[in-house]
């Protein structure tokens, strides 16, 4: 909630959206949050060789209250899921989530009761990044894709309309179980 929420829709709001998107995409602060082996690749992305600072993301924040992007780097255990959700809830709005690697995206090869089969069961995910582990170049590519999404983020009346359309689409989507091929 801010000044942009008060701006009427139309040309003025579109201009504010473009400016806010440009500023936001270049000043993301990720939460320090590594869960398993993918976190090593995430850490090396922030190191001197790949230099995440080029994209305005040099400061990984130790407090979720100072972070606006969560990179879920690694498998999420059932035990860790409530803590992950709590960190997400404490992050500032607007916030984004990047599921890094197959484990975070879908449970990966850990198809068992101990691992959450996709972090989207716990928090809404903006970008899924495949790989085991994804290399730093792949993480940077996913971050650039997230930048594009943030640059197009609607605000105010436009945002309300986008949220309503997304909710409608989610409610009218066919359940996954109906999409599976029946066994013979
Ligand atoms: S995707 Fe591969 S590297 Fe990443 S957490 Fe899972 S097993 Fe580890």
Image (tube, rainbow, N blue to C red):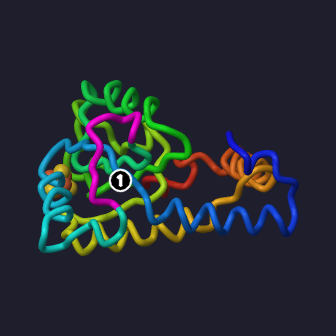
Secondary structure mostly taken by the magenta-highlighted segment of the chain: loop
Residue at position x 76%, y 50% from top? 156
Can I make out residue 82 in this image? yes
- Kindly indicate the quadrant of the structure image that contains residue 102: bottom left
Residue at position x 66%, y 51% from top? 173
Of residues 72 and 20, the one nearer the viewer is 20
Is residue 183 left or right of 149 when viewed as pictured? Answer: left
Is residue 25 left or right of 166 when viewed as pictured? Answer: left
Quadrant containing ligand 1: bottom left
Is residue 77 left or right of 25 when viewed as pictured? Answer: left
**In the depicted structure, whether residue 72 falls above or below residue 92:** below
Asked if the magenta segment contains residue 98, the reply would be no
Of residues 139 and 175, the one nearer the viewer is 139
Q: Tell me the element at label 1.
A: strand
For the N terminus, which image quadrant?
Answer: top right
For disc 1, the marked residue is 99
Q: Position of residue 75 (x, y in %)?
A: 23, 44
Is residue 99 left or right of 108 when viewed as pictured? Answer: right
Q: Position of residue 78 (x, y in %)?
A: 28, 28
Residue at position x 31%, y 37% from top? 116
For the C terminus, which image quadrant?
Answer: bottom left
Residue at disc 1, CB closer than 8 Å to ligand 1: no
- Kindly indicate the quadrant of the structure image that contains residue 56: bottom left
Residue at position x 69%, y 43% from top? 2
Q: Position of residue 39 (x, y in %)?
A: 17, 52
Q: Position of residue 113 (x, y in %)?
A: 25, 31
Q: Tell me the magenta residue range.
A: 57-66
- Kindly indicate the quadrant of the structure image that contains residue 171: top right
């Amino acid at each position: 909630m801010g000044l942009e929420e008060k701006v009427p829709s139309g040309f003025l709001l579109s201009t504010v959206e473009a400016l806010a998107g440009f500023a936001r995409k270049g000043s993301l602060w990720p939460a320090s949050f590594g869960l398993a082996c993918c976190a090593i690749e995430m850490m090396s992305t922030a190191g001197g060789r790949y230099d995440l600072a080029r994209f305005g993301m040099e400061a990984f924040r130790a407090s979720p209250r100072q972070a606006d992007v969560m990179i879920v780097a690694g498998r999420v255990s059932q035990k860790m899921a409530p803590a992950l959700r709590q960190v997400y809830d404490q992050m500032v709005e607007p916030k984004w989530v990047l599921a890094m690697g197959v484990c975070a995206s879908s449970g990966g090869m850990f198809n068992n009761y101990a691992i959450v089969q996709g972090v989207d069961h716990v928090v809404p995910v903006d970008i899924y990044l495949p790989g085991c582990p994804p290399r730093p170049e792949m993480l940077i590519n996913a971050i650039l894709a997230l930048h594009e999404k943030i640059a197009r983020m609607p605000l105010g009346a436009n945002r309300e309309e986008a949220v309503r359309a997304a909710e409608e689409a989610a409610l009218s989507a066919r359940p996954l179980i109906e999409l599976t091929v029946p066994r013979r």
